[in-house]
Image: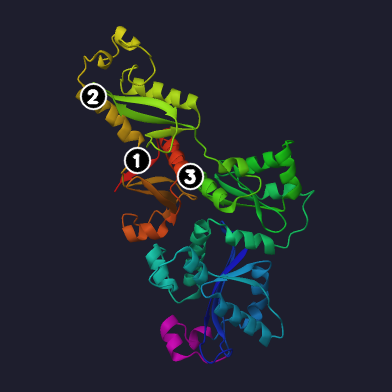
Amino acid sequence: MYAILDIETTGGKYNEEGITEIAIYRYDGHKVTDQFISLVNPEREIQPFVVNLTGINSNMLKNAPKFYEVAKRIVEITEDCIIVAHNSDFDYRILKTEFKRLGFPYKRKTLCTVELSKQLIPDMESYSLGKLARALGIPVSDRHRANGDAMATVKLFKMLLNKDLEKVIIKSTVKNDKKPKIASNLKNIIEELPTETGVYYIHNDKGEIIYIGKSNNIKKRITQHFTNKNSKSKKIQALVSAVTYEKTGSELAALLKESAEIKKNKPIFNRALRRTIFTHALYSFTDNNGYINLKIDKSNIEETPITTFSTRPSGKHFIHKVTDEYNLCQKLTGIYSTKTSCFNYEVKECLGACVNEEPPSEYNKRVNALIEKYSYENKDMLLIDRGRDVDEKSVFLIENGVFRGMGFFDLNHQINNREILESLITPMENNRDTQHIIHSYMRRNKRLKVIHL
């Protein structure tokens, strides 16, 4: 659990500042669960440059509560939370100073979104909250006021959690989470999980990730892990201390994140999934008569496939489907082995490419239309799919046929702006597994929106 906050102060000498405004959002990694926003009477003078910066003056604070009047609420909303702020050293120091004046110690773990941004979004021109938010397309209202800056930090932190493929943030959070031993309490873990699409992470008591999975219903899948009687499930049940998750909305996003994060984190119970996840592919070649032939064959790294398949039967099913859809010759797609005409020619359903009656140029137009649809080699395009909320979409960037990464954007983001688009994208490795996942998903999902760049 996180307490994402921003504090405005009077300015002045080090450790003599007072709080003039505070905003705190309690955030569970997915949504805001509580909030506290208040002006505060600092009982001291506000520096003139601060008045000009924030617009907060002494007249506004005459009737505001003093810090001792809001201290209890601050303790409650930040209980068992990691403090998250943009330059958390400053905000945390100010809070500790105010509590020290009351004679109370105040101790919390902290995370700084400046430092996290430098690690996860390198090479930005500036890491100030305003400039960073502008570069990332994060809307900010009431800049230099606590509520506006705190809400911008919530949106930035949500983006950083998504970009953290090595799961450094959630692993440290689970490790520091004071939860009781739960060998007999698996049911309590399940009750907190969503029934939505995403990636889930099973942790041991050290916070280490021991298994990563993807599901269209996270709660249902974890229930299966906790109730199955096979050897792996029993080992997971014995070691599990917590389950965290990341909603993706899009199944494609979940598949890609699962593949990438298994490779990066190497959980002990994911060994089988580290291997290549497809075995067969669709290839093309031109015969001596000038016709483009198609064939399903075992995948190999020396040839560039049109699309790939998890099994030979799924490839065979696909080639039968597109042969009918594009009116292709059964002989030239490998369905009907013959030295003469194919079966469909005999029943007047093939235009005669198998016996050189249909001109190669006419036949190849239909084959190339198929290749154009199912291959993204040398293409620049965006794939747009469901987001985690109704006002959000997921986006996947392909440049020159190479998968560059994925991200999420609010519907008010202008993803046609290349700089904003690239800042939203979490870079991910382009490998044979990611290519297969994208190929397979594009074949199965007609609602996937494709934007050619």
Task: Give the CA distance from mark 1 to mark 3.
Answer: 20 Å
The stretch of residues the image draws in magenta is 44-61
Q: Give the answer, above or below, for where 25 lies relative to 183.
A: below
Dot 1 or dot 3: first in sequence order is: 3
Q: Which residue is mark 2?
A: 290
Q: Residues within 10 Å of mark 2 (few under 14, many from 20)?
A: some
Name the main secondary structure of what is drawn in magenta: helix
Visible residue check, residue 28 = no
Q: Which image quarter: residue 16?
A: bottom right
- What residue is shown at x 35% (from left), y 20% (from top)? 324
In depth, the one of 72 and 235 nearer the eye is 235
- What residue is shown at x 44% (from left), y 53% (from top)? 407
- Say which quadrant the N terminus sits in: bottom right
Task: Give the CA distance from mark 1 to mark 2.
Answer: 24 Å
Q: In screen coordinates, is 447 left or right of 187?
A: left
- What residue is shown at x 48% (from left), y 42% (from top)? 433
Residue lying farthest to the top in this orientation: 346
Q: Looking at the image, is mark 2 or mark 3 nearer the viewer?
A: 2
Confirm whether the magenta stretch covers residue 57.
yes
From the top left corner, tell me how far across and down residue 125 is, in percent: 38, 71
Which amino acid lies under the numbered mark 1 shown in the image of this protein? Tyr
Which amino acid lies under the numbered mark 2 shown in the image of this protein? Gly
The answer to whether the residues at label 2 and label 3 have Cβ atoms under 8 Å apart is no
In depth, the one of 133 and 112 nearer the eye is 112
Which amino acid lies under the numbered mark 3 shown in the image of this protein? Ser
From the top left corner, tell me how far across and down residue 310 is, in percent: 50, 32
Q: Residues within 10 Å of mark 3 (few under 14, many from 20)?
A: many
Q: Give the answer, above or below, for where 366 lies relative to 302.
A: above
Q: Which residue is mark 3?
A: 250
Q: Which residue is mark 1?
A: 376
